[in-house]
Amino acid sequence: MPGTIAIRTASAEDVPKIVALLNIAFAMEREFVDRDRTSDAEISGLLRTGTFLVADGADALAACAYVELHGRRAYMGMLAVDPSLQRRGWGRRLIAAVEKRASDAGCTGIDIKIVDRRVELPPLYRALGFRDNGTAPFDDPLLIKPCHFLLMAKELTP
C-alpha cells in the first residue's frame, strides 16, 4: 500500500490526465467494445454532475474515481488505477475516500455498476463490502460481444 498519498478533487485542468488514465486502465475492455473508454467531452460533462477524486503519481495521475451524489445514495464509477501501480492499495484508498465523501454528504450507501465480462471485479468489490443488486443493460452501438452491467451496492455506517 502506498505510504502517504494525497487524494484531491479534480479540476477542469485534470480532464486530459483523467482521460489518459481511464483509457489505459480500461484498455482490456476493447475486447468487447470497439472504442476508448472515455473522452475529454465525457469527463468534462461528468465534472458538471459530480466529482472526480484523484491521486497524483510521479508523472501522471496514479488513480481516480468518479462520485455523484443522489440524495441519500452516492454513485461511484470509473475507479481506475494506473496499471503499473495496481495491487499497491491505491484503489482501496480511493474507495475509502469516496465512502468518506458520501458519508460526509449524508449518504447512507454507494452504488456501482460493472461490466459482467470483468469477472475479476465482483469478488474484489464483495470483499470490500459491496453486495450484488441486480443487472442492467449495456447499450453501446460499438459492442463487439454481448454484455450487461452487474449492479452492486454498499451500505455505509454512520
Image: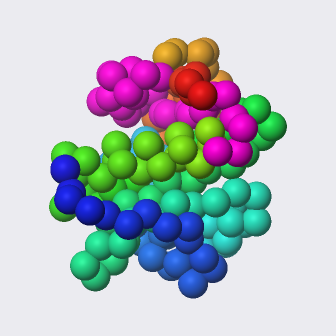
In this picture, which residue range is highlighted in magenta? 104-130
Say which of 50 and 4 sits in front. Answer: 4
Quadrant where the C terminus sits is top right
- Kindly identify the residue that appears in the image at 63 percent across and 79 percent down: 12
Q: Is the image coloured rainbow, by chain, by secondary structure, or in one colour?
A: rainbow
- Kindly identify the residue that appears in the image at 51 percent across and 29 percent down: 147
Q: Position of residue 68 (x, y in %)?
A: 68, 48
User: Exactly how many numbered labels are in the figure?
Assistant: 0
Residue 32 colored magenta? no
Say which of 134 and 29 sits in front. Answer: 134
Q: Residue furthest front?
A: 158
Say which of 144 and 152 sits in front. Answer: 152
Residue 106 colored magenta? yes
Q: Position of residue 129 (x, y in %)?
A: 43, 22
- Kindly identify the residue that appears in the image at 30 percent across and 52 percent down: 90
Find residue 5 and report its image quarter: bottom left
Q: Position of residue 20 (x, y in %)?
A: 42, 71
Query: Height in image: 13 above or below 99?
Result: below
Q: Position of residue 94 (x, y in %)?
A: 42, 50
